[in-house]
Image (cartoon, rainbow, N blue to C red):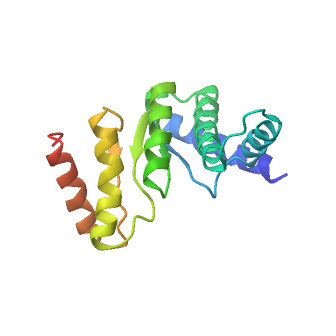
Amino acid sequence: GSGEKKDAQFATLIELAIRYEKPVRIGVNWGSLDQQILAQLLDQNARSSQPRELDEINRMAVIESALSSAALAQDIGLAADRIIISCKMSRVNDLVAVYRELASRSNYALHLGLTEAGMGAKGIVASTAPLGVLLQEGIGDTIRISLAADPVEEVKVGFEILKSLKLR
């Protein structure tokens, strides 16, 4: 099926990264979510005496998907310090919750960024809020600002966030 094809492509990518000594960013977003993981979590939740909110199930699915892909990469032979996890979240509180959980459950490098942050002040604030919280807690190794604007502006905002936190 398509899952096997995806697994074969993933294995090939990881093998090439090992051969050429390159790091790999493992990205998870709603679109690339492991549907089996999501289905299992939804089933478990349906049977639970204390069902969780759908948002929380989605966050759990993103985390499990990222960690299982990272584990698979390590099983294939990629060193843990060559793995960067990136979870594309479009809501501030989801981003903070997901990365706090990833940081507590793994030692992988973490790539922070709010996707679809928006334009102008709205986008800057939406990007700054979660990154400020997480970076202050020592969570995050690389950052990306997505403002649907000039990439130069995105870099300036990222630089200002790091400067304001005395990380730059």
Q: Whole-percent x and y of residue 80? A: 49, 27
132 to 160, vertically: above or below: above
Q: Residue 32 sits in which quadrant?
A: bottom right
Can residue 163 be spotted in the picture? yes
Q: Residue at x 25, y 55 (%)?
A: 158
| Image location (x, y in percent) of residue 142 | 34, 44
Q: Which quadrant of the figure has residue 14?
A: top right
Q: Quadrant of the C terminus?
A: top left
Q: Nearer the viewer, residue 63 or 110?
A: 63
Residue at 42% x, 38% y is 110
Query: Is 44 above or below relative to 6?
Result: above
Q: Is residue 167 left or right of residue 69?
A: left
Q: Give the residue drawn at x 39%, y 47%.
A: 112
Q: Nearer the viewer, residue 15 or 92?
A: 92
Q: How many marks overall?
A: 0
Q: Is residue 139 left or right of residue 159?
A: right
- Residue 12 placement (x, y as % from top left): 64, 43
Q: Position of residue 137 (x, y in %)?
A: 31, 33
Q: From where the camera sits, is residue 24 visible?
A: no
